[in-house]
Image (cartoon, grey):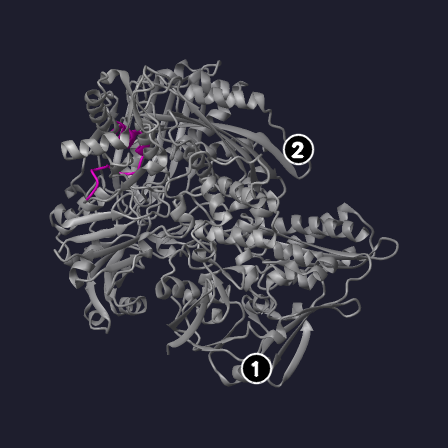
Amino acid sequence: MGQRVEFKINKKKYSVDIEGEETLLEVLRDKIGLTGTKMGCNQGDCGSCTVLLEGKPVNSCLVLAIDAQGKGITTIEGINDDEKLHRIQQAFVEFNAIQCGFCTPGMVITAYALLKENPKPTVNEIRHYLQGNLCRCTGYTKIVEAVQWAALNGEREEISHDSVKRLEGEEKVRGKAVYAGDIKKEGMLVGKFLRSSIPHGRIKEIRTDRALSHPGVEAVITAYDFPDRRIGFIIHDEYIMAKDKVRYIGEIMAAVAAVDEKTAQEALELIEVDIEELPGVFTYKESVREDAPLIHEDFDKYTTEVPLIRDRNICLKGRIKKGDVEKGFEESDEIFEDSFTVPVVHQAALEPKTVVAEIDHNGRIHIFSGTARPFAVQSGIAEVLGIPMSRIQVTATRMGGHFGSKGEITFEPIVAMLALKTGKPVKVEMTREEEFLAGNPRHMMDIHIKTGVKRDGKIIARKVRLEVDTGAYAYFGPLATSTAMNLASGPYSIPNIYVEGICAYTNKLSCGPCRGPGAPQVIFAGEVQLDRIARSLGIDPIEIRLKNALKANDTTATGQVLKDGGYIEALLALKRYLTENPQTYPAQDETKAYGMGIAGGFWGMGGAGSSAMVKLNEDGSAVLVMGAAETGAGSETAMAILVSQGLGIPLDMVRVISGDTDTCPFDFGAIGSRTTQAMGTAVHRAINGVKEQLLNFAEGHLGIPKDALELKEGKIKAKERPDISISIAKAVHMMTTVKGGPPVATGTNTAPSTPFNQEYVEGMVRPARPFFSFCVQAAIVQVDKLTGKVDVLKVIASHNVGKAVFKEGIEGQIQGGVAMGIGYALTEESIFDGGRLVNDSFLDYRIPTVPDVPEIIPLIVEKENPKIPEDIRGVGEPATIPTAPAIVNGVYDALGVRINRLPLTPERVFRAIKPLP
Amino acid sequence: MIHDFTYLKPGSLKEALAMYAEHDDCKVICGGQSLLIVMRQGMISPEYVLDIKHIKELDYIKFDPKDGLRIGATTTHREIEKSDVIKKNYPVLVEMERKLASVQVRNWGTIGGNLAHADSAGDPAPVLIALDAEITVGNKDGQRTMPLEDFFVDYFETVLQKGEIVLEVHVPAPAARSAAAYQKFNLLESDMGIVASAASVTLDENGACKDVRIVLGNAGPTPRRVKRAEELLKGKTYDEALFAEAGKIASEDCEPVSDIHASEEHRRHVLGVLTKRMLKKAWEQARG
C-alpha cells in the first residue's frame, strides 16, 4: 500500500515511501530523521510538533503526510539559513526562555510565524498567538519576553536580556538536543506494553504464543521472564510486571518487541489473558474499612527499606508527638478546625517517558533515557534482572520535563529484558494516554487540621490527620505521607503538635513524587487555615507568619534543631515589595470581585550523596564531569558557573559532562531540589582540589607563596604584584608536560547528619531533612461572581535561596513552579470513576496555557554574606508549594468564602457563593 | 496509531463527489483536526479517506452587500479570522474564530470540516445560526440548501446522506442596526466551550427589538435556539431585566449534560449568565 512521495522540507527535496495513514510528524521524525519536531501528545493539544506548512504553523501530528506532499514544509532545523541562529532562536537563548527544551522547537516555530505575520505584536498578541504551545517548565514569562525582544530587534533597550545564558540553550533552540525518543539505532525494535483493563483481579494465565508467532514479533515477555523478586521504593511490594494479580487499570502485564509499532500493537491484541476479576477498593475510606478486600494479601511478608507500621491495606501508619497537644488546646484562646481535600495531579512533563535499550558487543546493556537518577536506574535494573551493575550503563539523555516523573525506575528493566531477549535495540515510548493512565502522579490527600492559638496569633498547638491514597503500590506513598507529616507544622514553630499519617492502598495507579511530594498538599491545608486564623483574629497575614516563623535553633515537629532559618527574610522581602509597590485592583462590582492572598511554605531538601570531577585542559578550559543529569532546571549551567567563578575562567571555557553511569561519578539524583546544594558542594570541593594543584605548581614556578596567589581572569596572579602571573593555560600545559597530567580533582559530598528526636516519631520515613528552603507568595485574583471562574492576575513569589548561583535559572524555576501551582489551584485534577481514569488527555486534563499564566514577579532572597556552597538552597519544589493556598486565600479576600477543596473549578466557587438547586 | 486506510485524493469537486458515491465505508477529511484524533483513538476506522481539503473550488470567502457572505467548505478557520471583509461586516465571526482552539488548528481546520463533525461544543455553529446562516450540501446528483439549525441531528450527527458533503455556508447581509455577540465558557483560553451562547439583535428605527436570535452551544445534542426568549424580546426596548429574564429562559430551555467539566445545573446557570451578557453586548453594539 505504500507509495513514494516527494516532500519539500527546509528547501530540500526528500523522496520517501509512506502509508496513507502516516502523519507528517511520523514521517518527519521516523522516516526523514528531522527529530527537532517533538511528539508531546499526538492529538493537537500541546504544539510540540508545530511545523510550518505553506508558511503557516500547524500541528504536524494532525496533518496526514500525504496531504503535505508538494507543499513547502519548514521545521526547526530550517528556520536559520546558515550557522547563525535566527533572531528568534537567539532571543530564546538570550532570555533563558528555555528549560527542558522539549517544547522549545514548537514554541520557536510558532513565534517565528507570529513575527512573519505580525512583526510588531503587543504582549497580548504574543500571548494569544502562542496559546497552542504548552510549556510546563517556564511559566511562559521568559518566552514572552524573548519574543518581545526579537520583535523589537534590539531597537529598544527597556527589555533587558539575561547576563548568563544556559549552556545547552543553543542545541535546544536548534532542535539538536537529543531526547531518548530521538534516538534511532540500526535494526531497532519497537516495544509496547499490554496493560490491564480491569482494576483488580487474579491472573490465571497469560498466553503469549499466538503473539509470538505473529510475523515481525521478536519477543513477548511477562513477569515470568524475570527473577521472582518484588521491588519498591520503600516497600518491596511490586513485581516489574503484574505476576499474581493486577491491581490497577493500566498495570503492565506483558511486553512485546516487534519490527514496528503497528506489528507490536497487533501482537498485543493476540496476547490472551485470563483474569478472575476481584472486588476493587477505590478510595481511602473504602480501603481502611475492616472488611475491605485486601489489595496485597501477602503484605506482611513484604520487606521494607525501613521499619514501618503496616496493617492490611494500610502501608504506613506514622505518628509525630511533640509536647502535649491537648494541654496546648486547653491553653489556647481560640481553636480552628478544618478539613481539606486535594486531588491527584500529574507532573505532565511534555516529553512522554521514553527508554531505549541496546546490547553492546560485550553483552552489556546500555540504556538511554531522560532520567533524573541514572545511577538508581542502573542499580534498579541490576536488581530486577539479577545481573551485576557492571553489565549496565545508563546514559541520561536530554530530558523533556521531570517534576518527579522521571526520577525513579519504572519500566526500564522491561526494555532491558526485551533487548536481552532479542539481542537488538528496543525503544519504548509512552503515549500521552499511558502517561495519564499509568504515570506516578501526586497523591490525593484528605487533611484534617486543628490549630490552637493565643489571641495575639501565636500558634501553640496543632493536631493533624493525613489520609493518603497511594494507589496500587506503596511506591512514594510512605515517603510522601511522612514528608507531609514532617511539614504539617508549616514553616512555624509550634510547641505542641500531634500528627497522624495514614497511607492506604487502592486499586488505582501508584502515586509518586510530584514537585515536593507531600508538601503542596499539607502546606495548602495549613496556609489556608492560617489565613482564616489571621482574619478571625484581625492580624495581618504577613505579621502572623512573622510571629510564628521557624528560625535558627527552633525545633521542627520531629525535634530536628534548625541550623538556620530563612522564612523571616522571605516574608520581609515580600512585605517590603508590597509596601514599595502597593498593589491596586478594581473595586468589586456586580460581576467581578478582586482580592489578594498570601501563603508561605517550606520544603525539606533531599540529602544523600553527590560526587564530581574537574579536570583542566591545556587551553585553560575546564571539564566538569558529574553524575547529576540536567532535568531542564539548569544544573549544568549552575555547576559550570561554580567552576567558572572558582577558577576565574569564563563560563564558555567550562564544559559539562553529566548523567552517564560509566563515565561520571555517582550522584543520588536530580530530585528533592537538592542538586545545586548537594552537587554544588561536591563540585566546590573538586574545584578546590584543582585550585590547590594549580597554586602548588605556581608557588614553585612564580616563587610566590601560594597564599599570596589568586585565580583571576584565566591567570594565576600574585595578589600584591600585578606584574607577576602565569596563565592557567600555560600552567596546565607545563604541568601536563612535566608531571604527565593536568590538574584533576574529585569532590564528594554527603548531606550532614540531621538528628531528630526519636521519642517524637513513630513509623515515619526520613523524619529529618538536611536543609530547609523557605518561601512566601502573594496572588492577586479576579473572580467572576456569576459564573465562579477565577483568573490569577499576578503572583509575587519571594524565595529564600540562601545563595543564588544561576539567578536567571532560579527566576525560571520560580515562574514555572508558580504556573504549575496555578494549575493545581484552578484546573488540574485526575478524575476517576471507580478505578477508571476519566480524563487522559490535555484536552480534559488542563495545564495552564500562555494566556492563563499572569505576570510572575520573582523575589530572590539571599542570606546576608552568603557562602558557597553551604548556604545554597533549592528552589525547584518550593516554587510550586505556596501558590495554590495563596490563590485560595485571594479568592477568600475577594468573595469572603472558603473553599477547602482543590481545584477551584468555577462550579465549586460558584456553589460556595450561592448554592445551586 | 491510525488504522490503515486507502487515501483518495480527487482533483476536482466533481471527481470528489463521484468518488464519494462509489466508495462505501468512506470518510471525508477536510483538515482532519478532529477526525484524525477520533481515528487515532480507534473510534472510527474507515476503509477509505477522501481528502477534499485541497479542492480550490470550495476555498473562498465572497461578500456582496445584498447577497451577504458565502464561505466555501474548505476555507480554513484562519482565513475567516483574517478576512477583512468578515471583520468589517461580521466581527463576531472573527472574535469567535480567534478563540477557537489554537493558531495551529485554525490554520489547517476548515469551516466545512468543523460543521460536518457536528461537535455540540463546536464554536462556529451557534454563531452562524445566530446570524441566520444557511448551509448548502451536495452529492453527485445535486445540491440542497437548508437553514444551518436544521443541519444538525444529534451529537456528531448531521442530515448529510451517503455521498453528500458540505459545500458552502451562506450568511445573509447584515441588517441595519444589528449586531451579534458570542462567548464560550471555558477554563483555559484555548479550551473547548463547557457551554456557549450566541445572540444577534436587530433593532428598528425606534430602538426596539425587530429581530433577535439566541443560540446555545454544548447545551444539548445540537446547537439550539431559545425561541421562547426570542419571542419575549421582540418589540421590546433595551431593558436589563428583560435580558435577565431571557437568560433565565435560556437556562430552562436547554438539555445540557453533567460530565467531568461541569454539572448540568452549573451549565444551565452559566448558559443563563452568558445569554444575558451576550444579549446586552449585542444590543448595545446594535444601538451603535
Give coordinates of residue A812: x percent, y percent: 44, 37
Residues under labels 2 and 1: Cα distance?
Answer: 58 Å
Give coordinates of residue A896: x percent, y percent: 58, 31
Give coordinates of residue A608: x percent, y percent: 23, 32
In the image, is A32 to the left or to the right of B255?
Answer: left
Q: Number of marks in the image?
A: 2
Res A251 quadrant in image: bottom left
Using the image as rendered, state which of residue B46 and residue A749 is in the foreground: A749
Numbered disc 1: secondary structure? helix
Q: Can you tell which mark lies on residue A588?
A: 2
Chain that bears disc 2: A
Give coordinates of residue A706: x percent, y percent: 23, 18
Using the image as rendered, state which of residue B10 and residue B254 is in the foreground: B10
Q: Can you tell which mark lies on residue A805?
A: none
Res A784 quadrant in image: top right
Residue B284 in view (yes/no)? yes
Labels 2 and 1 within one chain: no
The relative height of residue A504 versus residue A721 in the rendered view (above or below) is below
Amino acid identity at mark 1: Leu
Amino acid identity at mark 2: Gln
Q: Per the image, is A842 magenta?
A: no
Camera-nearest label, 2 or 1 = 1
Res A421 quadrant in image: bottom left
Query: At 50% from the left edge and 26% from the top edge, which residue is drawn?
Result: A532
- Provide the residue designation for mark 1: B17
Chain that bears disc 1: B
Magenta segment boundaries in residue numbering: A663-684
Dot 2 crowding, Cα within 10 Å, few <14, some 14–19, many 20+: some
